[in-house]
Amino acid sequence: MEATIGDTEAIAAARGGDQEAFCALVGRYQDVAFRAAFLVVRDAALAEDVVQEGFVRAYQNLGRFHDGEPFRPWVLRIVTNLALNEVRSRARRHGLLERVARFRQEPPPAPEHEAEMDEERALLWRAINELREEDRVVLYLRYFLDLPEREIALAIGRPPGTVKSRLSRASARLRDVIERGYPGLRPARARAEAPRG
C-alpha cells in the first residue's frame, strides 16, 4: 500500500478487506481523533480507548459511509459521540459535581510542539470548561481543531445552519463567562474601559 494513497482509494480498498488500507486511514487521522476525544473526556488513557473503539466502529460501518463525503468529519463524529457517551456515563457513575471539579482542576495538555501553556490560554481553557457540554464541543471542534463549519456539521450530525447558530450562542455564552470571572481575558480596550471597583 502506497503511503500517498488518498482517502477514497483507502476506503474502497478497506471495504474490500484490505486492512493495511484502513491502517493508512487510522495513521492519517488518529492524532486529530485523539485530540477530539481528549477535549471531551479530559483523560489521556480514556481518550486512547475511545479512539480505538471509534476506529473499530468506523471499520465495521464502512458500508454506511457515503462516498464523496470527507472521511475526517465522519470518523470524528463517531469518536466524539463515543467520548460524549463516556462522559455521560462517568457523570452518572460519579455525579455531576465531581466531574465539574475535575474539569476545573485538571490542566489542559501541552500542544504538540510546546513545553508549557501560557497563562492566558490556560485561563481560556478554564472559562470554556464552565460552559455546558454542547457549547464546549462546538467550540473545541471549531477553534481547537480548526474544523470548518461544514465538517463540524458532519461531525455532530447537524445541519450547517445549526452549527453556525450554535457557534454564535456558544461564543456569546463564553463572552459572558469571561466578563464575569476572567477579566484578564477581555481585550485590552475593554479592560481599560471597565469600571474599577
Image (spheres, grey):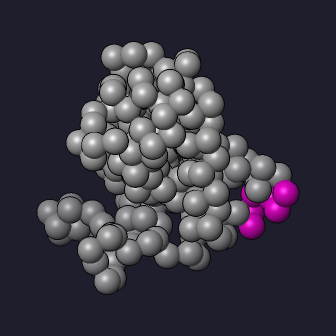
Dominant secondary-structure state across the stretch colored magenta: helix
List the single residue furthest toward the right: 93
Q: Say if 158 sits above or below 132 in the image.
A: above
Residue drawn at 28 percent across, 77 percent down: 114
Q: Quadrant of residue 130?
A: bottom right
Please tell me how many numbered marks the rendered image carries. Answer: 0
Expressed as whole percent of the image width and height from the top left, the position of residue 147 reads: 31, 40
Q: Say if 94 sits above or below 161 in the image.
A: below
Residue 94 is covered by the magenta coloring:
yes
Q: Quadrant of residue 110?
A: bottom left
The residue lying toward the viewer, choosing from 178 and 126, is 126
List the single residue furthest toward the bottom: 115
Expressed as whole percent of the image width and height from the top left, the position of residue 15 reads: 50, 25
Expressed as whole percent of the image width and height from the top left, the position of residue 22 reads: 46, 39
Q: Say if 115 sits above or below 80 in the image.
A: below
Residue drawn at 27 percent across, 46 percent down: 3
Q: Quadrant of residue 96?
A: bottom right
The residue lying toward the viewer, choosing from 7 and 129, is 7
Q: Which residues are magenta?
A: 93-98
Relative placement, left or right, of 11 versus 90 is: left
Answer whether residue 153 is visible to the viewer in this image.
no
Quadrant (top left, top right, bottom left, bottom right) of the N terminus: top left
Expressed as whole percent of the image width and height from the top left, the position of residue 90 reads: 76, 56
Q: Say if 78 sits above or below 68 in the image.
A: below
Residue drawn at 48 percent across, 56 percent down: 34
The residue lying toward the viewer, choosing from 111 and 107, is 111
Answer whether residue 6 is visible to the viewer in this image.
yes
Residue 75 is covered by the magenta coloring:
no
Residue drawn at 31 percent across, 83 percent down: 115
Quadrant (top left, top right, bottom left, bottom right) of the C terminus: bottom left
